[in-house]
Amino acid sequence: MQYKEDKDRLNQILLTSKNIKDNQEEILKLVPELIICVDCTQIHPNHIYNVYEHIEETVNKVDFNLILKLTTLFHDIGKPYAKIFADKAERFWGHEEISATLTRLILKRLKYDDDLISIVCKLIKYHDYKIKATTEGVSEAIELIGPLNMPYLLEVQTADLLSHAPKYYNIVIPILRSVQIIYKENFNEEFNK
C-alpha cells in the first residue's frame, strides 16, 4: 500500500511542479536511490551541474507527461556507478544500461505498469544514442527505439542537451534540430495516421 501512495505522490510532483527543485527533499524520500546522485560530480567540460542538479534541470525542461518526466528523472541515476576518471575528465561510459536497470527495479517497487516501465527503460537506455542527421540515421533510430517512442526520445535528448554546458549544447543542438526536421518531414506523418 505504501508503494502505491509513494507512486501517486511522485506522479503528482512530476506532473504539477514547475520546478522539481522545490520538491528535492520529498523526491529523495520517495526514491532514495537518487541520493547517491546529489553529491556526484561531473568534472567534464560539457557539464556545469552535478548529476542530481543535471537531472533536475532536465526534468524541468520536458512537457508534463509521465513518460517524459520519469525518463528524465532516472536517465542518469546510473552515473555514480559508472564514474571513472579518464582523459582528464570524469566519464560515465555505460551509465545508460545501469540507469535502465535501476529504473526498472525502482518502478517495479513503486508498482508502475509494466508497459510504462518498458517504454521508460528503453528511452533511458538510448537517451544518449547519437542519431545521424540523415534519413537513414533517423530511420535507424526509429527501428531501435520504436516509432511510437521516437517523439519522446527527441524531447528527452533536447532537454538533456540543454542541461549541459552552453558551449557543448550550442554545437550539438543544431544537429538534433536537423534530426527533428528530417523526422517530421519524412516519418512523422507515416506514424500518426
Image: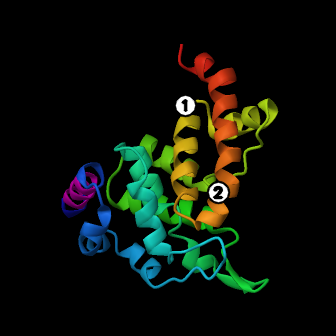
Callout 1 environment at 10 Å: few (<14), some (14 to 19), or many (20+)?
few
Q: Earlier in the sequence, mark 1 or mark 2?
A: 1
Residue hosting label 2: 170
Instruction: Residue type at mark 2: give it.
Output: Asn
Label 1: state its secondary structure: loop
Check residue 6 for magenta coloring.
yes
| On-image quarter of the N terminus | bottom left
Q: Which percent across, then down, holds residue 92?
A: 66, 74
- Of 100 and 56, nearer the camera is 56
Question: Which quarter of the figure has residue 115?
Answer: top left
**Magenta segment, prevailing SS (helix, strand or loop):** helix
Q: Are marks 1 and 2 in contact (CB under 8 Å)?
A: no
Q: Which percent across, then down, holds residue 75?
A: 52, 60
Check residue 180 for magenta coloring.
no
Residue hosting label 1: 148
In the displayed structure image, the side of residue 51 where residue 111 appears, left or right: left
- Of 182 and 115, nearer the camera is 182
Q: Residue at x 70, y 34 (%)?
A: 143
Q: Which percent across, then down, holds residue 185?
A: 66, 22
User: Which region of the structure is painted magenta?
Assistant: 4-13
- Of 66 and 100, nearer the camera is 66
Instruction: Residue type at mark 1: give it.
Output: Leu
Which callout, 1 or 2, points to the residue nearer the camera?
2
In the displayed structure image, the side of residue 127 where residue 105 appears, left or right: left
Residue 14, compared with residue 23, is above or below; it is above
Q: Which mark is residue 96?
A: none
In the displayed structure image, the side of residue 31 where residue 77 appears, left or right: right
Q: Residue at x 50, y 69 (%)?
A: 77
Question: Which quarter of the figure has residue 73?
Answer: bottom left
The image shows a total of numbered marks equal to 2
Residue 134, compared with residue 172, is above or below; it is above
Q: Residue at x 39, y 79 (%)?
A: 35
